[in-house]
Image (tube, rainbow, N blue to C red):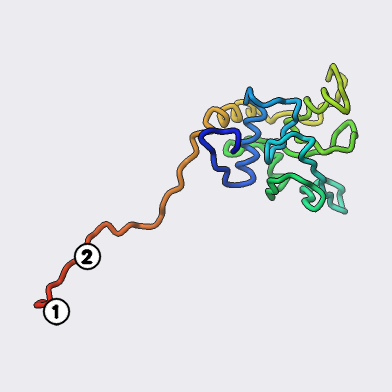
Amino acid sequence: CAKCYPKVRLSSAQHTLVHNGSHILFDPTINRSDQPCALCMRPFIICKFELTKTEATGTVRQIDWSRSNCMNRLQFKMSVAKKSTKQSPCTNHLLPCPLQCGRNIWTYNLDAHYRYPPHNLVSLDNIPRVYQLAEGEFELMEQVYADRQNVPQRRNLKKKNTQTPLLISAAHRA
């Protein structure tokens, strides 16, 4: 993670979404008007995403990387990213702008997206709520942010040979 010091190694797409989501929600150095990308934390004007849909249902399935330009091309399932669990509390995922501006927005950035161009809304009272945090998600994500430097160390599963080899004298060899 480029925002953390010392650096935090992000091991999977879901771990990256959770970790970066905690920055978006709680890091005071993040400019919310930048609407940071959940994969690389760069501003939305740099990272653009196109989504693929299934032909049968027309529902969004995944990022179309051939038409998207984020430098952190992580593969993840949108259906998994939408669900909050204790181990992976973040529900930040892409969805088409509900106000139909043609952009795909990370859900943690929806309020900022409404308040800045192209919408420039002063009040969000008349905006239908298409997304809200899952129950307990805010508290769990706050804990993720507080513990962001406490990444478990990988265990070395190879057994080390700590015994010294037995020395056999030439007289005892057959």
Judged from this view, the residue extending furthest toward the bottom is: 174
Q: Tell me what residue is drawn at x 81 percent, y 27 percent.
A: 129
Looking at the rendered structure, the kind of residue marked 1 is Arg
Locate the N terminus and report the quarter of the image it occupies: top right
Q: CA distance from mark 1 to mark 2?
A: 16 Å
Q: Within the image, what quadrant is residue 35 found in?
A: top right
Q: Is residue 70 above or below residue 124?
A: below
Q: Percent position (x, y) of residue 30?
A: 67, 26
7 or 125, which lies in front?
Answer: 7
The residue singled out by tag 1 in the image is 173
Number of residues whose C-alpha sits closer than 10 Å to that of mark 1, classed few (under 14), some (14–19) or many (20 or more): few
Contact between labelled residues 2 and 1, with CB atoms less than 8 Å apart: no
Residue 76 appears anywhere in the view: no
Locate the C terminus and report the quarter of the image it occupies: bottom left
| Mark 2: secondary structure | loop
Number of residues whose C-alpha sits closer than 10 Å to that of mark 2, classed few (under 14), some (14–19) or many (20 or more): few
Q: Percent position (x, y) of residue 4?
A: 56, 33
Q: Percent position (x, y) of residue 69?
A: 77, 46
Along the polypeptide, which appears first: circle 1 or circle 2? Answer: 2
